[in-house]
Amino acid sequence: MNAHDQDRMKKLLQQALPPVELGPEPGSGPSHDLWPAVLHRLDGRPAPVPWFDWALLAGLAALTAFFPAAIPVFLYYL
Amino acid sequence: MENGSSGAANQLDQFRQGSVAAFETLFRLHQRAVYGWILRIVRNPAAAEDLTIETFYRIYRAHARFQPARGFEAWARSIATHAALDWLRAAHPESETLPEPALELAAAATADPAVSAEIRVKTAQAFNRLPPKLRIAATLAVVEEQPQKEVAAALGISVTAVKLRVFRALRLLRKDLASQGITP
């Protein structure tokens, strides 16, 4: 594809998808105040548990399942 | 003026330390620009609002990694671009048609009599089938005519990589249209 073809494709694309115009008037932004939703998102989503915490928990569960005698030892060290 | 710039620096510093009040001030200052940037990419006002919320959520979660030297706006734009890219990847990956709001935006174009409405719609549909990484570069650099340096910074790639992605997008688009018998 040469430079001339590229220019033609660019022009066609600009015809098919005109640039989004955001005017200076207040109504051209978001339709409502998004801050409450941002706050809600920050409050609502707990911090993700790191993968190694899950791995440790799984290892501990497996150990106690296969070696139940180890449970009193763990309880002692808690 | 000095007071203003030191106040802004103080605001950024407080935000970096996790202050929600400073974050709200930054949100009020930048939400419109972030929303506009996202809208340019996704071309869907409802999705742009959701992604603006997601972007600021990601911004706050990453507050400790913020580098004031880079500037808040450029950093926010980069996070917004990646949120929009995730949306493009998840939304209608194999769709044959654009979402309705995008079609409305396309229909609002100043019609060039040399290009029929059918060709414009088919071009928009073919563009929507491009890989999101190529589509986002072409949208920002060609459709929105944003400076390539800004597009590169937002995507976290070099200017050369932006040019390459745009070239590949246009070549794939041309190939798709040619397969439908449309020769631009």
Image (cartoon, rainbow, N blue to C red):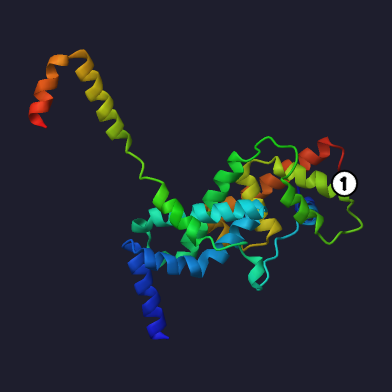
Tell me what residue is drawn at x 75 percent, y 58 percent. A18
What chain does mark 1 sit on? B
Measured from the top left, where is residue A10 in percent x and y? Answer: 75, 54
Residue A14's quadrant in the figure? bottom right
Tell me what residue is drawn at x 75 percent, y 37 percent. B96
Q: Can see residue B127?
A: yes
**How many numbered marks have been drawn onto this rendered protein structure?**
1
B26 sits left or right of B47 in the view: left
Q: Can see residue B79?
A: no
Tell me what residue is drawn at x 29 percent, y 29 percent. A55
Residue A50's quadrant in the figure? top left
Work out which residue is located at the far top of the displayed protein and give it.
A66
Camera-nearest residue between B73 and B23: B23
Q: Quadrant of the N terminus of chain B?
A: bottom left
Helix, strand, or loop for circle 1?
helix
Q: Residues within 10 Å of mark 1 (few under 14, many from 20)?
A: few
B84 sits left or right of B75 in the view: right
Q: Amino acid at mark 1?
A: Glu
**B14 is higher (above) or lower (below) than B114:** below
**A76 is higher (above) or lower (below) than B123:** above
Camera-nearest residue between B151 and B51: B51
Tell me what residue is drawn at x 65 percent, y 55 percent. B45
Work out which residue is located at the far bottom of the displayed protein and give it.
B1
Camera-nearest residue between A63 and B69: A63
Measured from the top left, where is residue B102 in percent x and y? Answer: 73, 51
Work out which residue is located at the far right of the displayed protein and give it.
B113
Measured from the top left, where is residue B68 in percent x and y? Answer: 38, 66
- Pointer 1 residue: B118
Measured from the top left, where is residue B110 in percent x and y? Answer: 84, 62
**A16 is higher (above) or lower (below) than A53:** below
